[in-house]
Structure formats: C-alpha cells, structure tokens
Image: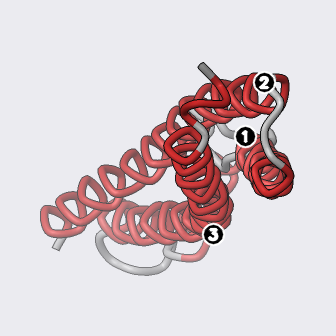
Amino acid sequence: MAAIGEIRLEEINAKEDLSLRLGDALDVKASIGLAIILFLATQSAYLLDKGLPRLGVHVQFVSIVCLVLAALFALFELWPRVYVLPEPESPIISQRIDQLTSHYIGYPNLETNVMNALLRDEMQWAANRIADNQKKNRRKSTLLECSFWFTGTAVVINLLTVVLSVKTIF
C-alpha cells in the first residue's frame, strides 16, 4: 500500500509542478503580447500622423480601443498572484505526525499506520494546492485569451488600414 501511495504522491507532485509551469508560461505569453500591443500602438500613431482619410481615422480609433483593452487584459493576467506552495520545513507536518501517533498508539503497526495516514494527508494537501493553482491559471488563461482577440482585431484593422491607404501613408 505504501509503495502505491508513494507513486501516487509523485504523480500528484508532478501535476503540481506542471500547474506552476503553466502559470509561468501564461505570464511569458502575456509579456510577448504586450510587446506586440506596443508595436501596434506605435503603428496606429504613425498611421494617424500620416493624415488618413476620415474613415481611416475612425478605423484607427477602433484599433486603439482594441489595443487599450488588450493591454489591460494582458496586465491583469500579469497581476501578481500568490501560488500555494509546499513549505519545506513546516511545523504542520510535525504536529500532524504527533496527532497520528497519539491516534494510532493502541493499534498494531504504529509506524506503518502513521506513515500511510501522513501519505494520504500529503496527497490531499497537494491536490488542494493543485486545485487552487489551476483556478488561478484558468483566470489567467481567460484574460490572456481576451487580450489575444483584441490584439488580433487590432492587427487586422491595422493591416487593412495599411493596404487601403498605401498612397496616403507613403
């Protein structure tokens, strides 16, 4: 039983590591998105400076609104969050071992019972951390997706503006 529990705990710890890596990957994508948004905002300013026709100006204002929203969503995605991590030297584990030892004192195989119960506790604690971290990652992913769609809209608008106004801007 202990060997199976240890294997399950390793699997849960690997999943926990993946959930933390996902949060980091989302942050990197949001940072890249902000760089793209900055480029597009500069492009929109350049296009507006070149004296676009009235329709081009209105379209670029739509692009700017999309870029502002995209930047806000990306910044909210990057907003610092506290991820729940295991503590290497936690007094909780020592206290839990003492509780389990006093509980199993009258049973045979005291050490095995305590070890199995502690293993189950550690798996539950890790599962709770994973659930909490996944909730944060889902929120970050949703914000990043919103930023992506607004950025994509601005890209299309800017490309159309460039194509339709080639004579004006060059």
Q: CA distance from mark 3 to mark 1?
A: 15 Å
Mark number displayed over residue 78: 1
Residue for badge 2: 50
Q: Nearer the viewer, residue 79 or 4?
A: 79
Q: Is residue 147 left or right of residue 100?
A: right
- Check contact, mark 1 vs mark 2: CB within 8 A: no
Viewer can see residue 93: no
Residue at image coords 13%, 62%: 3
Residue 43 vs 75, above or below: the answer is above
- Display colour scheme: secondary structure
The N terminus - image quarter: bottom left
Residue for badge 3: 135
Q: Position of residue 5 (x, y in %)?
A: 24, 67
Earlier residue among tags 3 and 1:
1
Q: Secondary structure at mark 1?
A: helix
The C terminus - image quarter: top right
Q: Quadrant of residue 88?
A: top right
Q: Amino acid at mark 2?
A: Lys
Q: Quadrant of residue 107?
A: bottom left
Q: Nearer the viewer, residue 54 or 36?
A: 54
Residue 7 vs 113, above or below: the answer is above
Q: Position of residue 145 (x, y in %)?
A: 57, 62
Q: Nearer the viewer, residue 102 or 127?
A: 127
Q: Position of residue 120 (x, y in %)?
A: 41, 71
Q: Nearer the viewer, residue 67 or 71?
A: 67
Residue at image coords 67%, 35%: 37
Q: Amino acid at mark 3?
A: Lys
Q: Is residue 163 left or right of residue 111?
A: right
Earlier residue among tags 3 and 2:
2
Q: Amino acid at mark 1?
A: Leu
